[in-house]
Amino acid sequence: QKEVEQDPGPLSVPEGAIVSLNCTYSNSAFQYFMWYRQYSRKGPELLMYTYSSGNKEDGRFTAQVDKSSKYISLFIRDSQPSDSATYLCAMSAQRGFQKLVFGTGTRLLVSP
Amino acid sequence: ETGVTQSPTHLIKTRGQQVTLRCSSQSGHNTVSWYQQALGQGPQFIFQYYREEENGRGNFPPRFSGLQFPNYSSELNVNALELDDSALYLCASSLRQGSTYEQYFGPGTRLTVT
């Protein structure tokens, strides 16, 4: 079993839809949770960073962490065709040792 | 733009050869990590350097080695290349300060081994 599970998609939605992306994990030591966006043949771009449980909002993006369920989510409101990319969740446990464990990524397609 | 640069963008090598990939960290960052991303997969952690010392290693064999220089630039060296080494190699820089874990990635080097 992988430490981090993520549905690879693709997830296809019309422009303006609310998108929900999710990851589950098995390692209860994970404390730091990130979402990255990766366009084709580019490096991952940090979107959201949260510590422990709770919600964090930044513009059209909201990240949620539920440590009791070992479940994290990223919501995108008013999705745009430019949001079409692969979304990677990543998490880390150890203080001072910044190893990120990634999901496989979910490919999102937003159609005009 | 993250300020992290990598070179070369793309290269093709033959099985058994050796390759060196380079990374220039974002200004002010003292930690660099290297990841391997196979097609359709998430990045896999190779190793991390902090102040020129290896600070942790993932499940990669010793033929994967690295260096970090005083100016915080870094190299990834891979010896005895295998076909399965074909992947996108990413470096990420961060500032090790307190409990921050924000890592910023470069555009990657795409390595093809034939």
Image (tube, rainbow, N blue to C red):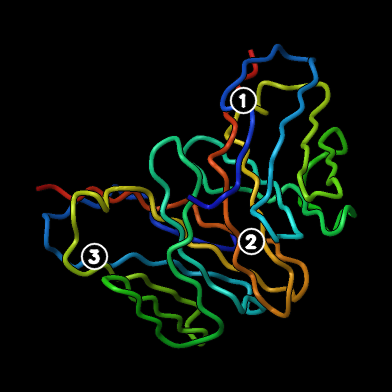
Label 1 in the same subunit as label 2: no
**Residue labelled with disc 1:** B111
Residue A5: x and y in percent read 49, 61
Chain letter of the residue beneath label 3 in the structure image: A
Residues at marks 3 and 2 touching, judged by CB atoms closer than 8 Å = no
**Residue labelled with disc 2:** A100
Q: Residue at x 73, y 14 (%)?
A: B15
Q: Kindly state the secondary structure of the residue where label 2 is placed.
A: loop
How many angstroms separate mark 1 from mark 2 (CA)? 22 Å
Residue B34: x and y in percent read 70, 46
Residue A14 versus residue B14 in the image, above or below: below
Q: Kindly state the secondary structure of the residue where label 1 is placed.
A: strand
Residue type highlighted by circle 3: Val
Of the numbered discs 3 and 2, the one sitting upstream in the chain is 3
Question: B30 or A108: which is nearer to us?
Answer: B30
**Figure quadrant of residue A47:** bottom left
On the rendered structure, is B52 left or right of A107?
right
Label 3 in the same subunit as label 2: yes
Residue type highlighted by circle 2: Leu
How many angstroms separate mark 3 from mark 2 (CA)? 24 Å
Question: B30 or B114: which is nearer to us?
Answer: B30
Question: B81 or B95: which is nearer to us?
Answer: B95
Residue A19 marker: 3
Residue B61 versus residue B7 in the image, above or below: below
Mark yes or no: residue A1 visible: no
On the rendered structure, is A78 left or right of B30?
left
Mark yes or no: residue B23 visible: yes
